[in-house]
Image: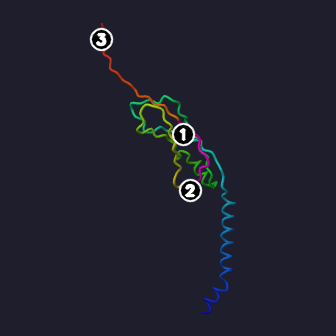
Amino acid sequence: MGCIRWIGRYLGTFLLSLVLAIVVWVAAVTEANPNQERSFYISIDVQGQESNTEIISEIPERMQLVLYAPRSNLNTIAKHNDDLHAWVDLSGLTDGTYTVPVNFQIPADVRPVRVVSRTPEEIEIQIEALVTATIPIRTQ
């Protein structure tokens, strides 16, 4: 019975101590590893292009990805910049003009990371069908 009375008497103090400990811990972690914003430039790959088509329009070589994360996560991404991927998917597109999204992937093992911005978000692509013809040649 004395234990229950003791818990009831000091429960408020215990909860206040727990909340203060969590606040101090969060402040210490944030101070040691503050959140920052950093730009990364990623090569854009073309995927799914039909073999009988040709891209006529200009495709940007790279996209800019601005990330917001703890400094240690941004440093990890910078060290392994090859793990960042950006691509446009042209699967099933025939001749014509299309606006396609630029997809990207951040390594799953680097979290938390928030995407602040990405440029370009979309690309306008003009695709034309390749026409081949076999022409007989005779020598004289």
Query: Residue 15, image x and y in percent?
Result: 65, 77
Callout 1 secondary element: strand
Is most of the magenta stretch helix, strand or loop? Answer: strand
Q: Nearer the viewer, mark 1 or mark 3?
A: 1
Which range of residues does the magenta coloring cover? 111-123
Asked which colour scheme the image uses, the reply is rainbow
Q: Quadrant of the N terminus?
A: bottom right
The residue where tag 3 is placed is: 138
Callout 3 secondary element: loop
Q: Are marks 1 and 2 in contact (CB under 8 Å)?
A: no
Compared with 98, 2 (above or below) is below
The disc, 3 or 2, on the residue closer to the chain's N-terminal end is 2
The residue where tag 2 is placed is: 111
The disc, 1 or 2, on the residue closer to the chain's N-terminal end is 2
As measured in the structure, the alpha-carbon distance from the residue carrying label 3 to the one carrying label 2 is: 67 Å
As measured in the structure, the alpha-carbon distance from the residue carrying label 1 to the one carrying label 3 is: 49 Å
